[in-house]
Image (spheres, rainbow, N blue to C red):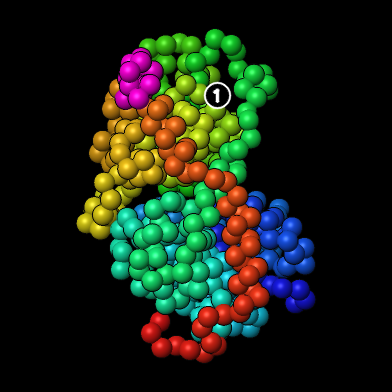
């Protein structure tokens, strides 16, 4: 194949972004590295030869897996074939734990070192998976401050590298230029709508957000709602949820989440990485989350943390409201947003909490630090010898 060969798996839209930045960092250190794997457009543009796209295997919740089972199975077979017939110098896994830990088992069998970048949230639920990680993964590169101590205590070789979103959201936003480019009038009060990057999320949450936007617009005709289009979604799919009477109030824009939220006074955001982007932009938000009833019921049985939003988890307290499952109703969402917009004390308290979150996340440079770990691992070779199958 020529040059050092890295296989990479990013199963979600945010993982595609962080994976592409990691690829760029590694290529700056060694331009001859060859990358294959699963990812999205950003990883493709960074130089990764995609053998499957992340949009084909991305899922939300347990029941939603069934809809993508055929694609997931075919992607697994493809990666296993590569690991067996063209073993890479390194396998890099990004989040997406069920699939990735299965692939890690095959990598170990074929003597391929494994770097896990962006930890599965085993600290939140199903903690027994840490044992599987310690058996199948050579090194963890984690992005939340509390994760390092969690893994180290359980015997996993781990490094805290900082959150990669700090690099993606480090640039100063020229709000005046962005508003002008998007044709936003000076008297518009902007509210962000971030319904997620997967179709299942859109189906569950966008109708709720649109109805809330309608209620808010009835209270203040100067409100304009900005919806950043995720690169994993087609504009026509998202637009199909927006009724004609709201088409002039909700604007779907081809801007990244951070830039859009930097313009907004408040936002409604699906639980996930976007909540941290909102925190870095300093925008008070309401987190909403809804999955199928079965997925939620199983999750309630297994989840061991008090919050679902990353902003609140990083803060260690409730900084912003969370509307989960049955509470994710337009009326509740509207009421919480009105409080943020109208109650000065609540807004000040929320902004101070978001500032603390930004300070806790700390340093940038996650891609560079992880790239250095990756290259060092390729130099050292695998921890597990080829063919060792005991205790997988």
**How far across and down, in percent of the image, does residue 78 sit?**
58, 73
Whether the magenta-drawn stretch holds residue 338 is answered as yes
Q: Quadrant of the N terminus?
A: bottom right
Q: Which residues are magenta?
A: 336-349
Quarter holding residue 177 = top right
Label 1, residues with CA under 10 Å away: few <14, some 14-19, many ≥20: many
The secondary structure that dominates the magenta segment is helix
Residue at (58, 38) in percent of width and height: 169
Task: Tell me the SS state at disc 1.
Answer: loop
**How far across and down, in percent of the image, does residue 310 sit?**
39, 44
Residue 102's place in the image compared with 259, above or below, is below
Q: Does residue 161 appear in the picture of this structure?
A: yes
Residue at (22, 56) in percent of width and height: 301
Residue 139's place in the image compared with 172, above or below, is below
Q: Quadrant of the C terminus?
A: bottom left
95 or 79, which is in the foreground? 95
Q: Is residue 338 left or right of residue 376?
A: left
Identify residue for label 1: 263
22 or 232, which is in the foreground? 22
Residue at (64, 19) in percent of width and height: 176
Q: Does residue 268 appear in the picture of this structure?
A: no
244 or 303, which is in the foreground? 303
199 or 340, which is in the foreground? 340
Residue 10's place in the image compared with 183, above or below, is below
**How far across and down, in percent of the image, does residue 259 sit?**
59, 31
Q: Is residue 270 left or right of residue 84?
A: left
Residue at (59, 11) in percent of width and height: 186
Number of numbered callouts drawn: 1
């Amino acid at each position: 194949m020529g040059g050092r060969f890295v296989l990479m798996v990013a199963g979600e839209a945010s993982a595609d972004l962080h994976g592409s930045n990691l690829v760029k960092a590694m290529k700056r250190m060694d331009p001859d590295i060859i990358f294959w794997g699963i990812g999205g457009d950003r990883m493709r543009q960074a130089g990764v030869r995609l053998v499957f796209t992340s949009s084909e295997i991305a899922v939300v919740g347990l029941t939603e897996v069934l809809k993508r089972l055929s694609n997931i199975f075919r992607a697994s077979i493809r990666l296993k074939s590569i690991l067996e017939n063209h073993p890479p110098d390194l396998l890099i896994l990004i989040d997406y734990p069920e699939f990735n830990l299965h692939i890690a088992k095959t990598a170990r069998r074929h003597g391929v070192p494994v770097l896990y970048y962006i930890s599965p949230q085993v600290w939140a639920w199903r903690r027994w998976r840490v044992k599987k990680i310690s058996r199948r993964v050579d090194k963890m590169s984690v992005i939340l401050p509390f994760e390092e101590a969690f893994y180290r205590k359980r015997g996993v070789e781990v490094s805290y590298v900082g959150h990669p979103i700090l690099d993606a959201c480090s640039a100063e936003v020229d709000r005046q230029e962005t508003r002008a480019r998007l044709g936003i009038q000076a008297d518009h009060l902007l509210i962000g709508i971030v319904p997620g990057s997967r179709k299942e999320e859109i189906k569950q949450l966008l109708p709720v957000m649109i109805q809330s936007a309608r209620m808010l617009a009835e209270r203040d005709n100067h409100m304009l709602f900005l919806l950043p289009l995720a690169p994993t979604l087609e504009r026509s799919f998202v637009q199909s949820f927006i009724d004609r009477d709201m088409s002039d109030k909700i604007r779907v824009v081809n801007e990244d989440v951070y830039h859009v939220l930097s313009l907004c006074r408040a936002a409604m955001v699906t639980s996930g990485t976007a909540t941290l982007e909102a925190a870095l932009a300093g925008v008070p938000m309401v987190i909403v989350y809804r999955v199928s009833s079965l997925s939620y019921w199983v999750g309630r049985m297994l989840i061991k943390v008090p919050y679902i939003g990353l902003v609140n988890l990083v803060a260690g307290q409730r900084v912003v409201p969370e509307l989960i499952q049955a509470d994710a109703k337009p009326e509740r969402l509207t009421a919480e947003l009105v409080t943020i917009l109208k109650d000065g004390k609540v807004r000040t308290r929320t902004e101070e909490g978001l500032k603390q979150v930004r300070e806790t996340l700390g340093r940038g440079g996650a891609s560079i630090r992880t790239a250095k770990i990756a290259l060092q691992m390729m130099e050292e070779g695998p921890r597990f010898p080829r063919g060792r199958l005991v205790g997988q």
